[in-house]
Image: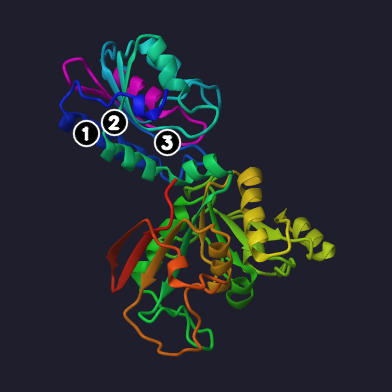
Amino acid sequence: MDTNEIPVATSIPADVEGSHMRRALELAERGLGSTSPNPLVGAVICSPDGRVIGEGFHARCGEPHAEREAIRDASDRGEDPKGGTLYVTLEPCAHHGRQPPCTDAILESGISRVVYASEDPTEKASGRGPSILREAGVEVARAATEEVEGADSLNQPFRKRAATGLPLVTYKAAMTLDGKVAAPGGDSRWISCSESRALVHEMRGVCDAVAVGIGTVLADDPLLTARNGDGSDRSVTDAPGTSDGAAIRVVFDRKARLPLDSALVASQDVAELAVVVSAEADPARVSGLERAGVTVLSAEGPGDGDLVRSGLRALSEQMEVSDLLLEGGPRLAGAFLDAEQIDRLLIFVAPIVVGSGEAPGVIEGSGAKRIAEATRAVSCSHLQVGDDLLLDARLREW
């Protein structure tokens, strides 16, 4: 059925429908950092007389989906969902994956009406669940526009990977008021305030992968781990992110120059490490990295853009990365932007001015030749973080 033909929920007052779906969105967010490569999903069940009798969310990849959790919650409360309405942030699945189809659970429960917000863009799922439910006599409706937009926004990584096979890329950087990320000599500690740096560790804790270029590694020897408030690293057992915990650390390293004695190689017990190399890489160095336990991904193509796109595809296909936080320097960021692979910018602006034309800017790629050709954000917002201003710009929506 075409999207335009799907009825919008109207039989219950819009404000009531909206409040239930907003609650479902709140529930969905509880799975942030733990469900990838699955989407974030929340669900609320209301009885025929309008009472909320069950709630649930998808907590972790491989565990029950939100619909089944909400049905289980209703049972635990001693409530019967028969004849009730299910509000769910993503259309119910109808395929067998790590979990059985949610459509089966809905039909078995006797729920008579389903209101969903976001469509599932994957080929195996798109539209099948709602169609099966309708054919079985369940009333199915689409939520109001506001809730649809909220549900789509919540699952941008899932939606991009479904549409393109590539992970969503968020570029994070700290810059001065005059757009510089370091002093002319390379000194950048610390541009951002302590509150901003703490927030970055929270970002690392909920993404699938954190990426930098080899230049950053050789200059700073970073760990790229998500650290707790006391400065300790979150291990793979206590940090959210991919299926086994902490975010994968990724180095874009065309010639496999990553030192075997680097902090990244030495800390693989804390978080996994992957290196994206090209055909230019010395086979002996590649073998050395592999013997050290590093996952080496081969990227194809001669240019930086080829390395970016091919590397992202390898991360998606071989390591199920859906959400990548790019923390590399301005040259790597420029390569990603030129390859049209930056979807979101998170820029911490510090209240300081360097004032040097020789200091590096926040992104240094080929870029646009004319202002009319510049990439324009589709949305932009800001947040005060300590003394800094955090700019959140989305370059594309999925």
- x then y, percent, for residue 144: 26, 33
Question: Disc 3 designates what residue?
Answer: 59
Screen quadrant of the C terminus: top left
Query: Is residue 294 highlighted in magenta?
Result: no
| Residue 219 in view of the camera | yes
- Measured in 3D between alpha carbons, the distance from the residue under mark 1 to the one under mark 2, in whole angstroms, is 8 Å
| Residue 266 in view of the camera | no
Left or right side of 344 for 95? right
Query: Is residue 63 highlighted in magenta?
Result: yes
- Measured in 3D between alpha carbons, the distance from the residue under mark 3 to the one under mark 2, in whole angstroms, is 23 Å
Q: Quadrant of residue 372?
A: bottom left
- Residue type, numbered disc 2: Ala
Q: Which residues are magenta?
A: 45-74
Label 3 sits on a secondary structure element that is: loop
Q: Within 10 Å of the Cα at label 2, are there few (<14), some (14-19), or many (20+) other Cα atoms?
A: many
Label 1 sits on a secondary structure element that is: helix
- x then y, percent, for residue 118: 38, 34
Q: Which mark is residue 143?
A: 2
Does label 3 or label 1 sit earlier along the sequence?
1
Q: Nearer the viewer, residue 33 or 90?
A: 90
Q: Quadrant of residue 365?
A: bottom right
Q: Identify the residue at image location x=58%, y=65%.
A: 212
Question: Disc 1 designates what residue?
Answer: 18
322 w.r.t. 126: above or below: below
- x then y, percent, for residue 127: 45, 25
Q: Nearer the viewer, mark 3 or mark 2?
A: 2
- Measured in 3D between alpha carbons, the distance from the residue under mark 3 to the one under mark 1, in whole angstroms, is 23 Å
Q: Identify the residue at image location x=49%, y=37%.
A: 38
Left or right side of 171 for 139? left
Screen quadrant of the N terminus: top left
Q: Quadrant of residue 294?
A: bottom right
